[in-house]
Image (cartoon, rainbow, N blue to C red):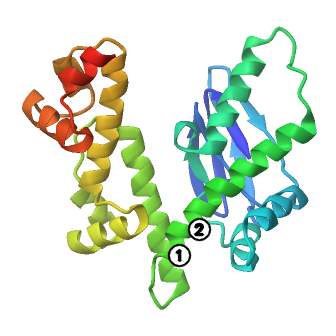
Amino acid sequence: MKYVIEGEENYSINQKRYCVKKGEFVVGNQHSFSSILIDSPHPVKGICIDISEQKLLEIIHYHLDDSVPFESYLFTDELLNKKFQANNTSLGVKLDQLGKKIQSALEPPVLSANDLFYSLADSIVADQMQIYSQYSKLKFCKQETNKRLFSFIMEVTHHIDAHFTEKMQLVDLAKSASLSEYHFIRLFKSVNGVTPHQYVIKKRLAFSKLLLSDNCSVSEASFQSGFSDVYSFSKSFKAAYGYSPNLFKKSN
């Protein structure tokens, strides 16, 4: 895995390109053939860690009785999702914490390698088990179709995670994969459990809570989190949480 602390790095993994920016990371296995290009006038810092298959297997066997299908996914070219945002995954949170420790220390922090590797391995397995569970929900006859569509849905999900406060036309994203709007919504819901619109609202409301807790006004939190007006924000907020944003702000 490679986590970017500062700057950005451009990877080519199995002939697919990934621009990995600050707070993002990529993962791969022995079937990931990659190259990297760092072309930036600014300093680029990152963390590169290799977790042994043995440690991952220990954790997998602890959690799963029938681990063969998941092992096949994780340790072969089945591995689908390679780029992540740190704040959306268990592994990313730990990499972010590790990066901050390394940057803030005058000398590199003294870490128990075994404890660190097991902790990271545990997060890799947890994150990938969730992705595998989502992937397994697709029921197309051809495995290649499942892989292609799942990769597309995950790319859309990452795009929403990065841009949910902005106006976005999800219909255009559907067209980019030659899908009808109905088919796209159906696929997205089968993987994420909610429709694209519901996913966007959920992200915006979670962000608005952070803003309100940070002393933003209700109107400011509404617009900063991507809602078009305070009324629609307040209505969505109360529908999701059972109380108004004003009441939440007062209680915090």
Residue 247 position in % (x across, y down): 21, 22
Is residue 196 left or right of 77 when viewed as pictured?
left
Is residue 125 left or right of 148 when viewed as pictured?
right
Residue at point 75% right, 61% down? 33
Front residue (pair 202, 80): 202
Asked if 67 appears above or below 40 in the picture, the reply is: below
Q: Quadrant of residue 156?
A: bottom left
Is residue 187 left or right of 52 when viewed as pictured?
left
Q: Quadrant of residue 246?
A: top left
Is residue 166 left or right of 134 when viewed as pictured?
left
Asked if 222 appears above or below 241 in the picture, the reply is: above
The secondary element bearing badge 2 is classed as helix
Q: Are marks 2 and 1 in contact (CB under 8 Å)?
A: yes
Asked if 22 appears above or below 70 in the picture, the reply is: above
Q: Quadrant of residue 69?
A: bottom right
Residue 82 position in % (x across, y down): 62, 55
Disc 2 residue type?
Tyr
The CA distance from mark 2 to mark 1 is 6 Å
Residue at point 69% right, 35% down? 95
Residue 209 seen anywhere in this rendered image of the structure: yes
Q: Which mark is residue 16?
A: none
Q: Which residue is mark 2?
A: 132
Residue at point 83% right, 46% down? 118
Residue pushed farthest top? 106
Residue 177 position in % (x across, y down): 35, 69
Q: Which residue is mark 1?
A: 136
Disc 1 residue type?
Ser
The secondary element bearing badge 1 is classed as helix
Residue 128 position in % (x across, y down): 64, 59
